[in-house]
Amino acid sequence: MKEKSVEKVVEDGVRFLSKIFPQKTYLYFPLLSAALVWAIRRTKEWKEKIFSWKIWPDPDLVKVKPDEFIINFYKSNPDLCRAYRDEIEKKDLKTLREAFRCLYPILGLEDPFLFALFQKELESNEYNKIVDEFDAKVSLARNDIDAAEGKARLLEGLKTFAEEIVSFGTDLLSQANAQKAIAELIEKQLKKKNE
Amino acid sequence: MRKKTIFLCLVLFAFSISSCVSHLKEAKLYYVNGEKLSRVYKTEKALASFKRALKEAELAVAKHPSAQAYMLKGMAELNLELWEKAEESFIAAFSFGFEKGQEWAEQVSLFGLASSLQELGLVDSAFKIYTYLLNKSRFKSVTVLAAQRYTHIALKETLQEEGRERQKLLNKLLKTAEKLADKDLSCGYYHYLLSQVLSHLLEYKKSFEEAIIAKELGLPKEEIFRDNDLQIVFCYQKLKEKLSSEKREEFLSVYLLWVKKWNWPNSETPDWKKR
């Protein structure tokens, strides 16, 4: 049997998602990316992770982190440190804590779905935009997925995608490289689809 | 004629008993089914099942009210986010009293009651129940859930205070967290909570140690696992700044052994981090 290429697997994944979410192309990358990362990290739990939609960590946990931890989070990331220099200097914990609620799950805990959902803003270091749009964008994604018909079919499709991608070897697919490659391939596939 | 009437009464009595037993049974079946569907993300079907469970529980309550029937009614309402009704049902369950051997049902009902109170904004009342469950519950799943809610509410309260008042509240919370970890040394989650509290108290060495114990014992969710890893890195950075050169060397040599054991690429990057 002829083995599939990574490109073919991504193409199949995009084709599959376009049947379930024909108008919601913005969900393709977050869903495929989350399926891939969780399949690599925790093979047994990935289903739960992808569909839990309780954007993690549980909001209470993020809301009660110590002040020092929050300041350290900003200081440890040079781009964040630059973007929030004034607030760090003034120890404006009200602003820092509010932004932390949105940024920590993405940049600290690296939720693959959120990371992919805000990929463009992250590439251009638009952290304020992430904070401003976080609730609306996450809520829209959650509603669109909840409204999808045949969720069991979606789950199976993502599982097939994840298994096929992982068969190329988890060592080979380090998170950053795999996500970057997948992002490029998805973009290519979406362009092809729109032509 | 008299015999016939007695017989009819007995049949009706038996029927009413069997029908309310069956309503309770049906309510349980629909509730369990709802939980199962919910776990596989069939949200709509799960909600439909919880609605059926609620209907059956309501019938059971109407025909033969009992603590269990009210508990099931409350649990179904909790899942349907009918907080006020859930609260009423749990209170009704307690007014009936639980029979011997139903301690688990009593504690689940208490946790359910606290959750609905919290959702309704009655945080102080919910907090009292979580405190009670922490001290009295013999069921680990209930205690862990109560510990999580208790700690979050307590930490939120401390963050609203300053200076001595904050310190006082944190010390009180620390005692509870220590008690929990002592009671069940093998529960990684309790050590994680303890590490978080110690971090608020700026006790980075102890926080670091508790986070390592939590990591080694295992944590229930990936997000908590990752948060705990970041707590280890945070404490490491703080200790590196604070310790004297002699102590720092000693600490670093031990820390690097852990880093090697966990297969982290370096001392500040957990293995799941993008590189």
Image (cartoon, grey):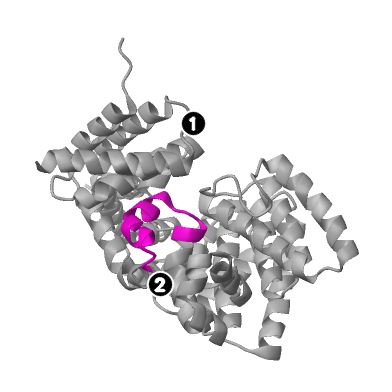
* Callout 2–callout 1 Cβ contact below 8 Å: no
User: Secondary structure beneath disc 1?
Assistant: loop
* Label 2 – label 1 distance at C-alpha: 42 Å
Q: Is residue B87 visible?
A: yes
Q: Of helix, strand and loop, which mostly describes the magenta segment?
A: helix
Callout 2 secondary element: helix
- What residue sits right under mark 1 in the picture? A170
Magenta span includes A109 = yes
Viewer-proximal residue among B191 and A87: A87
Circle 2 sits on which residue? B119
Where is residue A135, by image quadrant?
bottom left
Q: Chain of mark 2?
A: B
Q: Which residues are magenta?
A: A106-126
**Mark 1 residue crowding within 10 angstroms, few (<14) / some (14–19) / many (20+):** some
The chain under label 1 reads A
Whether the magenta-drawn stretch holds residue B157 is answered as no
Q: Amino acid at mark 2?
A: Glu
Tell me residue A65's x, y (percent).
Answer: 57, 70
Where, by quadrant of the figure, is residue B231 drawn?
Answer: bottom right
Point out residue B177 in the picture as x, y percentages from the top left corner. 70, 66
